[in-house]
Image (tube, rainbow, N blue to C red):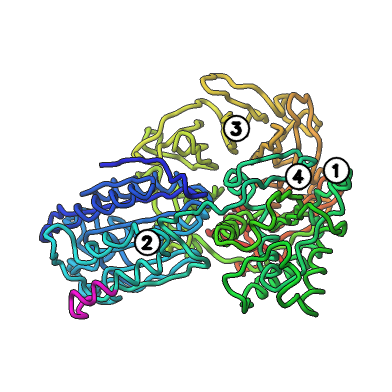
Amino acid sequence: MASGFTSSKNSIYTKRALLIGNNEYKNNRRRRYCTNDAEDLANKLCSIDFEITVDTNLTYAQMKRKIKTFHDTINPGDLILFFFAGLGCQWSHLNFLVPVHDDQIETNTDLEYRTINAQATLERIMSRRPLAAIFLLDCCRNSFVRESSHSNDLSSMRAVADSFICFACDANEVALDESTNGRNSIFISHLLQHIDQPNLTIDEIMSNVCDGVMKETNDDQCPFRVSALRRKVYLNEQITNDEPDQMHVAPHNGYSIKKTREFLVKYGPYLRTTLKIAQILFKLGSFVVPQLDSVSQAASSDVDTILSTFNKQKEMQQQLNLVEKLLDHQWTQSNSTIVGQDKSRGLPLQEPDLREVEKYLDVTDNKRSLGDLYRIVTADGHVRWVCLEHYDDISFNNAMLKYTDQLEAMGEQSFLFNHINIKTKWKQHGVTIAGGNKSGNQLNQLDHPRSIYIDDDHQTIYIADWENHRIVEWEYGAKTGQIVADRNEYGNRSDQLSGPRDMIVDKTNDSIIISDYGNSRVVRWPRQNDKKGETIISNIDCYGLTMDKNGDLYVSDYANNEVRRWKQGETEGTIVAGGNGQGNQLNQLHLPTHIFVDEDHSVYVSDLYNHRVMKWMKGAKEGIVVAGGNSEGDSLTQLSNPYGVIVDHLGNVYVADRDNHRIMRWCKGSKEGSIVVGGNGKGEQRNQFNYPRGLTFDVQSNLYVVDCWNHRIQKFDIDLY
């Protein structure tokens, strides 16, 4: 059973819920109320305009697929609720949600592969950067695993920032499988009474639920809560009509939005910082948000700026921290509204706080003056001017306070901007996130891995495990990987691989595209049904793979010294780099390995035996040397057998300089590179490599390197300070 509903018109964010209830267990006594609980709670949430997905009696594969599909629908700023009723247990301080095929679970190890890890599910949902996520678990039931090291209850979970977790009973206790209404568990029967109450926060709702459960059970069952919420979260917020009528970005910036809520949704991130300052200033007195002298002056001023230097970014962050600190201050005149004639009343902002706020504004924009436009400063340093036609109305009413909370949340999500610039550095000691247990074919081992792909949406790493002839999926923080392509010995059947060199994830088709080098083919392997692949390109000495924003596939042909682009349905492809025989001229390549395509469809190629990286612009007949090209060597102007290559948004080239055991960066137009990480000789220390191959960045600009002969993947965190 699954349903979808339109989100509330009274909310400036979308509310989404996934509810699962399992009754029909194979080995254990049938649950009595779990499916009812999921369906009844879904109906309640539907009535307060949640978009609902609800399903019951799911197998492991169905639960995994349902959660993944739900995860993929989440947008930044959404309010998320996840509910599970059924069997659950803990092992090794982790909680597992059990599907109905519990007869397939005989050992504790089976829990890792046949149940849902609750903590990992929460963290994956939070990776989508929602406004908040609420986890409700009514599954503290007797465990059934035959081994003796399990526990008959659930352990506490770690709440990720902006998440809220509630168990039906206290940690390390077992919930009562009883009902007073004959339809729902005790916990859910009380939750149904409170969850749709208007203008209550989730903390207030669950406090009422806990009181009711404890009274009914004479304190035998006490729901347990863990909260990391940083703001008030309402499930059924009823916004009053005292909101401002018109608020829009000043027309000279090209925007004019008359509907307040539309403006808040679309431009919320631009409002976050100034509204935080305004909240302090409105509360403390007469010092108002700095304004321009006049609209005409604003029209002739270009105030759209960005903090381009590292020192400015750091200084701005320090000032943001100050604003956070100031927000902790309390205003003694509660429930007051500052209107025109009252703006001079109250306690004004005093030294040194006033000077610090002025300093903060000077950092972001030094053109501030008084007038009738209000400056909006984004978290990453952009400046906009906003007309507030009803400034007095919004200064301190309840609706604006609620908007401020929501805007802060939206702005925090937008703070994740691309940190990389020409001065960006990374920590010099890496952390092993996959492999590192010598060469081997166990699930915690790799054998000469060649390339890596980061799926930020699912917090998953895909690895081309070359000597093991397989593709391995490794979740963030996991101790072991899972084989997702070729569970058999190497070979040339459709369910086998032979020495895969590279792979990418095609999210549109939910599949992995693999450079099956030993079989001279490119194969597509479905992520959901991973038993065999489909050959999409044959008779090619394929090495590197990439895909552009249009979905066109690019493949480097190792033997023919060329790179071809394949559009959907093509059988031959089009040469986009090389193709003029082996050589070192600008229109030639000599064993191309890894490739990268930028937004302009320029192709970057690691030209192995020419010890250089080439850039071929769209339609060009010859390439441009953008890294190396000064024969083989270890100086800053040279490379030695380059492999992995990636280009940032500024056009800087990052390359795995294999035989120099280092990662290099060539800034756009530079004649020499700089060492990013490594360069400390061949070795297995945390600051060393042993023939690095592939490399990539995650969404937070952390660097990942395939340390081939150390049989591991290393992560180097970005160094922001």
Q: CA distance from mark 4 to mark 1?
A: 9 Å
Pointer 4: what residue? 250
Classify 10 Å Cα crowding around label 3: few (below 14), some (14-19), many (20 and above): many
Q: Say which amino acid is labelled 1.
A: Ala
Discs 1/2, front:
1
Between discs 4 and 2, the one toward the N terminus: 2
Pointer 1: what residue? 299
Discs 3/1, front:
1
Q: Is residue 365 above or below residue 225?
A: above
Pointer 2: what residue? 135
Pointer 3: what residue? 555
Between discs 3 and 2, the one toward the N terminus: 2
Q: Say which amino acid is labelled 2.
A: Phe
Q: Say which amino acid is labelled 4.
A: Ala
Left/right placement of residue 535 relative to residue 272 reads left
Q: Is residue 408 magenta?
A: no
Q: CA distance from mark 4 to mark 2?
A: 41 Å
Identify the image quadrant of the C terminus.
bottom right
Between discs 3 and 1, the one toward the N terminus: 1
Which residue: 76% across, 62% down?
289
Classify 10 Å Cα crowding around label 2: few (below 14), some (14-19), many (20 and above): many
Discs 3/2, front:
2
Question: Looking at the rendered structure, which numbered label has been put on residue 602?
Answer: none
Discs 4/2, front:
4
Q: Nearer the viewer, residue 569 or 350?
A: 350
Between discs 4 and 3, the one toward the N terminus: 4
Residue 616, by quadrant, is top right
Q: Secondary structure at mark 4?
A: loop
Range of magenta residues: 211-221
Residue 119, by quadrant, is bottom left
User: Do the residues bearing badges 3 and 1 touch, measured as CB atoms within 8 Å?
Assistant: no
Name the spot of residue 279 as percent of width and height, x first: 66, 66
